[in-house]
Image (cartoon, coloured by chain):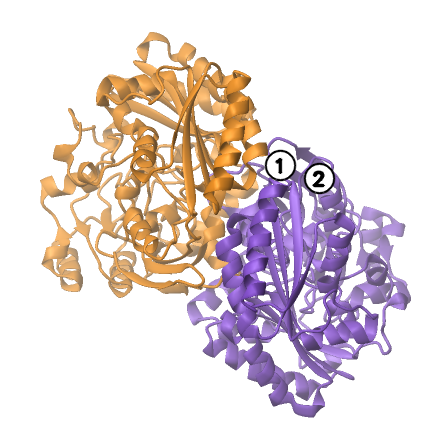
Chain colours: A orange, B purple
Amino acid sequence: MFTTRSCAKLCSKLGKSLGLRKVHVLPDFTQNSYNVRRGNYSVLQDSHIDFFQEIVGEERVIMDETDLNRYNIDWYNQVRGKSKIVIKPKTTEEVSQILSFCNDQRLAVCPQGGNTCVSGGSVPVFDEIVLSSDLMNKIISLDETSGVLVCQAGCILENLNNFVADKKLLLPLDLGSKGSCHIGGNVSTNAGGLRLLRYGSLHGSVLGLEIVKADGEVLDCLSTLKKDNTGYHLHHLFIGSEGTLGFVTKVAIHCPPQSKAISLAFLGAPSYENVLKTFKRAKNELGEILSAVEVIDTPSMDTLNDHLQITPPIGKHEFYLLLETKGSDEEHDQQKLNKFLESVLSENLISDGAIASEPGKYHAMWAIRERLPEAFLHDGYVYNYDLTIPLEYYFKLVADVRQHVGTEATRVFGFGHLGDGNIHLQVSTKEFNKAMKKRIDTFLFNKVKELNGSISAEHGMGFLKAGYLSSIKNESSFKLMKSLKALMDPNGILNPYKVLEN
Amino acid sequence: MFTTRSCAKLCSKLGKSLGLRKVHVLPDFTQNSYNVRRGNYSVLQDSHIDFFQEIVGEERVIMDETDLNRYNIDWYNQVRGKSKIVIKPKTTEEVSQILSFCNDQRLAVCPQGGNTCVSGGSVPVFDEIVLSSDLMNKIISLDETSGVLVCQAGCILENLNNFVADKKLLLPLDLGSKGSCHIGGNVSTNAGGLRLLRYGSLHGSVLGLEIVKADGEVLDCLSTLKKDNTGYHLHHLFIGSEGTLGFVTKVAIHCPPQSKAISLAFLGAPSYENVLKTFKRAKNELGEILSAVEVIDTPSMDTLNDHLQITPPIGKHEFYLLLETKGSDEEHDQQKLNKFLESVLSENLISDGAIASEPGKYHAMWAIRERLPEAFLHDGYVYNYDLTIPLEYYFKLVADVRQHVGTEATRVFGFGHLGDGNIHLQVSTKEFNKAMKKRIDTFLFNKVKELNGSISAEHGMGFLKAGYLSSIKNESSFKLMKSLKALMDPNGILNPYKVLEN
């Protein structure tokens, strides 16, 4: 599976080396922490290794135990696999040969992109072979007129964004993990992130994919057309299926034009009620130029201050609201934004605010939002939840969870994509506690069910939530998912223990 | 199958009664015009009819030969089935019982929405039972905050748009056939239309579906959440699969807010080169307020004038360009539009223009574009093509086809969604000629293949293009489509002879 952590700042350096991570204790092996049984897969033999080395060369087969750590452990230190081998193909053909062989040999495979998943979806659970897209990082083409970019799945999101920026385009998604996450992982998890409000989901932006099926067959659905209604729309099957139905090797994605004018307002509000009123007003008054709306609570900001010494640009407030505008006329946009800010300030909906338009300040202000998860990790262990619930329940739920977990938690905090109805609710403790996880899971997932919400808005089911799928889906949907898995991967070698089964 | 004709004005009255259509001669039966063999399905028996009448009541089972015509013949008079029965369920439960029975009895079924498909996808080919969504027209809910509308599949698009308009929302799609087409058909064909440039495809807007599978099982994927990454994204399977994988019964769709200011510019240009230059300039200068871009050539406009006595508001030009803007500030939008128009006029990119902002004039101006297909039909028979090709080839292809068909054609014309790279190329003749169709098909589809385009941008494969699917898709994609069909509909009862097979 390619997966990505959608909403956390993952500095490339941190992502690349465990040594640089703020990790005091390596997490326990998943097979010890969780009640999960190894599937009936083959165990890696020397003859298998010989085959892999023949396909990609010795230097692209990683087997050193220390080197393996960063492929076995997720960035959030939640899960830890025991894979003995990482293979790094460069081409679709190599992926095809490897998967065909693994399928014949009944060897389980864990597809991995930038390993930035926070649902435990991107690392092995047992000894699955890690099939990494690290070296599948070629940009294939960019059509400047249509804005369609075609690239290999292992391209890092930020690199792609920089590449298309030269042509005054941008990627339609932006994540805190952009410095590490791979576009193939973004697609496989249907990553959301900071630009969804403006540019919509990947189901709208991804025009085509090339996928290698579990049996090694290459499925070429790499259309670059904005409109193409010929036959079934196959590539959508692989958007959000977390590498369990196929290994994404190439992506065709529509890149919208950059806006000429961009502003980011960082606002402080005395209550969540005022945050909601301000948001409603922004939608109405800023209309088509409103491009992102994020909310952060005080405990989140405190964590950032405590561990990374980052403070908001406007002093302390109960809630912080980030409002971004993107438009084609700076003067018009400024007029709209100023008029809006004057009205919400004069009515005391917000208490204070700062605006950044100059790139340096703009990026620094966004970094406050993006570095939150990095700060949380310093508390110890973080139980992270990614929920879609009605907006009015956002921080009521945070308060409920705070009460529910009591003093056992270091902190309970919430932040997230207000514009999309998606909150990231986090609980930090000094160290992982299985009972605590179960307790929060049960409490929260029941609440989300009551509210007709989603227990995974954008992070996917991965390993950590896979066990809940059968209980949140109706029987017919779950059965069809199982049938699709059986059709696409009859031997179940692709990313086992994830999404559907645990 | 629910299908819709995406880009033609279909007045409700015309759609409802063959007698009011400008039809001189009823088309020949499809089984006579085309080389197609009836599948091994059961033939309708009295016992079947008894069963259907028991489920829905006698009055909702249509068997009168004259009444059946409008369900057996498509609006474009291209194809004609021989169904003996139309059933009109009102509920999902009724659809489920009917399909379960048909599946057991091996009775072939043709799902039908507003019967506005122009690819011959919405009418039977032989004697399939027509399962009509005519009476499944209930609006279930509208969440004003999130903009999510839930309704039955047989709701007419225009009715839905009027309903949400009261709450200052709009449907994210608009088609010439809005007065007749059903939302279930729109979803099943992934209809494009006039608003796609601004609001994207239905894969982005449709949040959930309820579907009845071929075996009668109800598949509830009716999520109303903007973000929900729990398990496989099943509902996308049914978007664009033209009723061959399931019968859509309910739709949850995101409705964006209405814009406060709307303008439509109707421009005349002396050459297609200038049209393209003007379009490029519009994208750059109008940016986020540009909401639709349509092009019409002179022969199209002549047809409108000849048959419906409609003339453009700006005299005669080689090409006409419709540019729509939608924004949140009338003054700002006017400034942007005026500045843009002054520059393209002063540089002689366009020769003349008219602007409509007042609703009456705005709708009248749009009607010129929307009524084109209605006018074409008066020429006799229309061979209609719906292509995605690179913009620069649009009218070169029209000219090539004109030369290719020579004097046998009454007219060859082109119009379409310039903003999405999608042209509707039409050839009219006095009456249908099988050899002529083959000749144009072969010529055009080869050209489209050379240009890496699509032979169906938004209309779907239906019956008329189904025979070409295996040659335009690569083997692995086609094989997977076949496998999905076999998984979802093992007896092949749903909309046979369409999409995959012919």
Give the side of residue A292 with respect to residue B122, left or right: left
Relative height, residue B94 to residue A9 (above, below):
below
Relative height, residue B249 to residue A380 (above, below):
below
Q: Residues within 10 Å of mark 1 (few under 14, many from 20)?
A: many
Q: Chain of mark 2?
A: B
Rendered image quadrant of residue B121: bottom right
Q: Mark 1 highlights which residue?
A: B147
What percent of the width, then of the height, locates residue B4? 69, 60
Residue type of the residue flagged with mark 1: Gly
Residue at 61% of width from left, 51% of height from top?
A: B325
Residue type of the residue flagged with mark 2: Val
Residue closest to the eye, B347 or A455: B347
Q: Mark 2 highlights which residue?
A: B164
Residue closest to the eye, B269 or A17: B269
Can residue B154 be seen here? The reply is no
Q: Residues under labels 2 and 1: Cα distance?
A: 9 Å
The answer to whether mark 2 and mark 1 are in CB contact below 8 A is yes
Residue at 34% of width from left, 40% of height from top?
A: A497
Q: Residues within 10 Å of mark 2 (few under 14, many from 20)?
A: many
What percent of the width, then of the height, locates residue A395? 47, 18
Mark 2 lies on a secondary structure that is helix
